[in-house]
Image (cartoon, grey):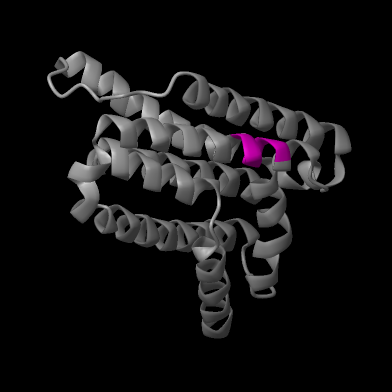
Amino acid sequence: MVHNLIAFMLAATLLTLTPGLDTALVLRTAAAEGRQQAMRAALGINAGCLVWGAVIALGLGALLAVSTTLFTLFKLCGAAYLCWLGLHMLLRPRTHFASNASDDTLKSSHIGWGMKGLLSNVLNPKVGIFYVSFLPQFIPAQHSFVGWTLILVMLHIGINLTWFMLLIHATRPLTQLLRRANVIKWLDRVTGGLFLFFAAHLAFGRR
């Protein structure tokens, strides 16, 4: 059991450190909108991991692994969502972020970033496919599949959160620079381009 946990921790850490959509989303949000918004995006991303973990633990993930139609449906929904985010940032980049917004506006914004993080994972079927093919390798024989799946997913979430906190902290020295109007527009456009790249990769990539 200890060997399995150590092996999983190493593999999950390497997966987390690999640059991808989640890293791009957290970095961009931390640089342009601050730590609180970035933490909400990070929590949303990890909530998406928890959703997929629960789906896999309940056995529904096996359907995604064998059903081409279901996989394609999730893939196209995820690609469409990422494409919408990317085009919005490219065509309508912001120049500032309101600092005197009302409490209701702030709450709405916070929920929005959490939902963006959540949807970026929930609408990506490759996360489900990865969990289906990856997690069972580290579950000891004759142990509860459901229990161990949830344990491994929680460990993965812990690694994710640690990495995201390091990324968020690293942006603090550059906060003032990254809040300038031209820098904000550049960040939105670059992030929008990245989102479109990930959307295309998701839509046209092989299973």
Residue 193, percent across and down?
Answer: 56, 36
Residue at 54% over, 70% down: 14
Q: Quadrant of residue 149?
A: bottom right
Q: Is residue 87 above or below residue 47?
A: above
Q: Is residue 38 visible?
A: no
Q: Nearer the viewer, residue 206 or 90?
A: 90
Q: Nearer the viewer, residue 24 or 124?
A: 24
Q: How many marks?
A: 0
Q: Is residue 165 above or below residue 52?
A: below
Q: Nearer the viewer, residue 157 or 3?
A: 157
On whether residue 53 falls in the magenta region, the answer is no
Q: Is residue 52 above or below residue 101?
A: below
Q: Quadrant of residue 15?
A: bottom right
Q: Report the residue that reaches farthest toward the front.
A: 182
- Left/right placement of residue 184 relative to residue 195 reads left
Which secondary structure dominates the residues rendered in magenta? Answer: helix
The residue segment tinted magenta is 196-200
Q: Report the residue that reaches farthest toward the bottom.
A: 3
Residue at 27% over, 29% down: 181
Residue 78, percent across and down?
Answer: 65, 32
- Left/right placement of residue 175 relative to residue 60 reads left
Residue 114, percent across and down?
Answer: 39, 33
Quarter of the picture holding the N terminus: bottom right
Residue at 49% over, 39% down: 190
Q: Nearer the viewer, residue 142 or 129?
A: 129
